[in-house]
């Protein structure tokens, strides 16, 4: 997820001397994913029981020419654009898999064909049921309107030693439903708020741009059919195409690379305007509350095994019942709510030589055949 976010936001090309790119680059960053509300309670509890966490996860990315390695925890992924090859490494099991761009394209093509066949079967079954039941239910047309706004409040901050400017990108997807013979009504909005701190000085922008250029050149033919399929999907649903194009145009105007980027996914009830300040404050308050609870939980005596799990489930149920009792006599008013936040922050950027060994499977690791390699 972290790599996908950075690739999507690193769109501008900075001009740096060729020797800097040749000697390599090492980027240290952390990611933090938080789910809010009831979903957050369940996911956080599952993470605690499993001994894992999605908070402050360290990630290291290496660039050397047209090669990129990203590692986090016990896993690493290597992309060699010149060779057209992916390598995934499991340091815990001491294994690795390797597959080519062509292998992945074939696997994607096979998945698309399978999805098309299943869709056709479901459509046929649906049509048969509709004919059998002679359904007279009124039809409802749903329309989605997209709006993209950019705001530069003028704030600047030093992040990992580089000056960065704060830029907000807000993508609003507003839904409208029109029942057959009825009036059009709003059904609410999904808002994606991207809070970015962009630097024009950080070197990874140029490294990423050069890597992506080489990747696109090598992968172009392999993924040609998948690109055509994506275009067909856009043509089939202009709402999707319009929203993505609008967002891409706004993002392309932002020169530089994100040093800190936080994405907020917020649901907004019908006939209400998105409140950016509220989204930022609620997310900060929720994170602080969760961090405090985690800190307090560390100080409590540990109960392991099944008994500990039951205790945590019981505590979560009691909290839910307490909230329900507090709101029982209150008239619930609709309000916006953020369902998930994803944060990625660069901690250090170090230009310098990167060992060639980092872009190959470690010595002594066992190769595991990838499902991709049998797709063609």
Image: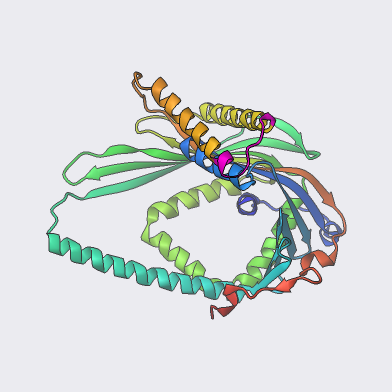
State whether residue 305 is above or below residue 334.
below
- Determine whether 22 is above or below 281 in the image: below
Q: In terms of image quadrants, where is residue 336? A: top left
Frontmost residue, 198 versus 86: 86
- Determine which quarter of the picture holds residue 359: bottom right
Q: Is residue 375 visible?
A: yes
Q: Residue furthest top?
A: 329
Q: Residue at x 66, y 73 (%)?
A: 368
Above or below, 186 relative to 324: below
Tell me where residue 339 appears, x and y as whole percent: 49, 38
Residue 69 lies in the magenta stretch = no
Judge whether residue 341 can be spotted in this image: no
Whole-percent x, y for residue 96 in the image? 70, 69
Give the quarter of the figure containing the C terminus: bottom right
Q: Is residue 308 magenta?
A: yes
111 left or right, relative to 254: left
- The span shown in magenta is 299-309
Question: Which of the pair 342/215 is nearer the observer?
Answer: 342
Q: Between 176 and 27, which is closer to the camera in this rendering?
A: 27
Pinpoint residue 362: horizontal percent, then vertical percent. 79, 68
Q: Which one is in front, 15 or 365?
A: 365
* Count of numbered badges drawn on the protein: 0
Q: Is residue 153 left or right of residue 244?
A: right
Please, which colouring scheme is shown?
A: rainbow
């Amino acid at each position: 997820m972290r790599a996908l976010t950075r690739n999507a936001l690193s769109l501008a090309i900075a001009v740096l001397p060729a020797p800097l790119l040749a000697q390599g680059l090492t980027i240290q960053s952390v990611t933090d994913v938080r789910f809010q509300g009831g979903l957050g309670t369940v996911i956080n509890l599952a993470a605690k029981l499993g001994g894992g966490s999605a908070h402050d996860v360290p990630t290291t990315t290496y660039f050397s020419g047209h090669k990129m390695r990203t590692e986090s925890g016990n896993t690493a992924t290597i992309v060699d654009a010149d060779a057209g090859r992916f390598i995934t490494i499991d340091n815990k099991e001491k294994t690795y898999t390797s597959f080519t761009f062509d292998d992945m394209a074939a696997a994607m093509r096979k998945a698309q064909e399978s999805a098309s066949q299943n869709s056709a079967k479901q459509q046929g079954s649906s049509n048969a049921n509709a004919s059998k039941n002679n359904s007279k239910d009124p039809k409802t047309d749903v329309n989605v309107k997209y709006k993209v706004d950019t705001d530069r409040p003028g704030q600047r901050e030093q992040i990992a030693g580089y000056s960065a400017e704060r830029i907000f990108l807000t993508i609003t997807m507003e839904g409208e439903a029109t029942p057959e013979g009825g009036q059009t009504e709003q059904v609410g909005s999904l808002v994606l708020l991207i809070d970015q701190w962009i630097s024009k000085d950080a070197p990874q922008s140029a490294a990423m741009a050069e890597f992506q250029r080489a990747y696109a050149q090598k992968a172009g033919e392999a993924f040609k059919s998948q690109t055509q399929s994506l275009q067909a999907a856009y043509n089939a649903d202009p709402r999707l195409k319009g929203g993505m194009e609008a967002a891409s145009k706004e993002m392309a105007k932002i020169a530089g690379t994100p040093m800190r980027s936080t994405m907020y996914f917020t649901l907004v009830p019908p006939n209400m305007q998105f409140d950016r300040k509220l989204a930022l404050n609620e997310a900060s308050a929720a994170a602080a509350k969760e961090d405090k609870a985690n800190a307090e939980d560390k100080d409590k005596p540990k109960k392991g095994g099944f008994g500990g799990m039951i205790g945590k489930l019981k505590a979560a149920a009691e909290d839910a019942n307490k909230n329900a009792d507090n709101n029982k006599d209150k008239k619930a008013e609709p309000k916006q709510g953020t369902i998930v936040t994803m944060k990625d922050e660069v901690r250090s950027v170090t230009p310098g030589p990167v060992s060639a060994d980092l872009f190959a499977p470690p010595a002594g690791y066992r190769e595991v055949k990838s499902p991709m390699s049998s797709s063609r």
